């Protein structure tokens, strides 16, 4: 829990800097790129984060990566600060919080849509527009398919879950029958 609070604090600090210098989107892309690289390349993550290796060598590896990725001076400074404070291992959490904060800054809400069957582009767009109207924000919709739903859709936007799946309706009906309630 403490790690998430630390990650949130660093993400907020970077966003404040980004708002101040007008480069919040640049930092979003750079942070995402670095975080993705660390996730994909576990050996790289070990080389930078593992305290069994010499700190000076780990810092040189981090500097070389930042240079190869051609990140801005601010991002390079930010990554080195995380390293010096022993927080570089939280980079994925920091990135996740930063992405959410940057979305909030731009008025974007991210949502997921899970359907039992493949949906047409037109249907997905109608759902996206409805969610935009409901939230008052531009909605970026991530669509996936799960035949286990039997039918219908489940939409998640923030903490709100709109479950219109047949599977859930059947489960609710079963619970009602178990309790002896009439339908």
Image (cartoon, rainbow, N blue to C red):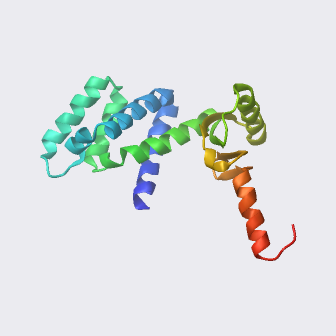
Say left or right for 5 vs 45: right
Note whether 1 is above or below 80 in the view shown.
below
Say left or right for 46 vs 145: left
Residue displayed at 66% across by 41% down: 115
Asked which quadrant contains residue 106, the reply is: top right
Q: Nearer the viewer, residue 9 or 41?
A: 41
Looking at the rendered image, the quarter that the C terminus falls into is bottom right
Looking at the rendered image, the quarter that the N terminus falls into is bottom left
Residue displayed at 24% across by 47% down: 49
Residue displayed at 20% across by 49% down: 50
Q: Position of residue 126 (x, y in %)?
A: 76, 31
Asked which quadrant contains residue 135, the reply is: top right
Q: Where is residue 71 in the image (x, y as percent from the top left)?
A: 34, 26
Residue furthest out toward the right: 182
Say left or right for 65 vs 93: left
Note whether 73 is above or below 152 in the view shown.
above
Q: Where is residue 162 in the image (x, y as percent from the top left)?
A: 72, 50
Residue displayed at 78% across by 36% down: 130
Note whether 86 is above or below 111 in the view shown.
below
| Picture mark count | 0
Q: Which of 12 and 36 is in front in this view?
A: 36
Say left or right for 183 vs 54: right
Q: Which of 135 and 40 is in front in this view?
A: 40
Q: Where is residue 152 in the image (x, y as percent from the top left)?
A: 73, 45
């Amino acid at each position: 829990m403490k790690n998430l609070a630390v990650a949130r604090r660093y993400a907020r600090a970077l966003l404040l800097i980004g708002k101040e210098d007008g480069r919040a989107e640049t930092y979003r892309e750079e942070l995402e790129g670095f975080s993705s690289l660390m996730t994909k390349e576990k050996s790289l993550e070990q080389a930078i984060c593992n305290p069994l290796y010499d700190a000076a060598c780990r810092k040189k590896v981090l500097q070389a990566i930042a240079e190869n990725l051609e990140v801005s001076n601010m991002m390079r400074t930010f990554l080195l600060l995380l390293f010096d404070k022993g927080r570089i291992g939280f980079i994925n959490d920091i990135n996740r919080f930063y992405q959410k904060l940057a979305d909030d800054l731009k008025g974007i809400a991210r949502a997921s849509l899970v359907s039992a069957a493949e949906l047409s582009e037109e249907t997905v767009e109608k759902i996206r527009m409805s969610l935009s109207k409901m939230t008052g924000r531009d909605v970026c919709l991530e669509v996936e398919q799960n035949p286990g739903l039997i039918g219908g859709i489940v939409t998640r936007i923030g903490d709100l879950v709109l479950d219109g799946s047949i599977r859930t309706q059947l489960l609710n009906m079963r619970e009602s029958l178990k309790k002896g309630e009439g339908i």
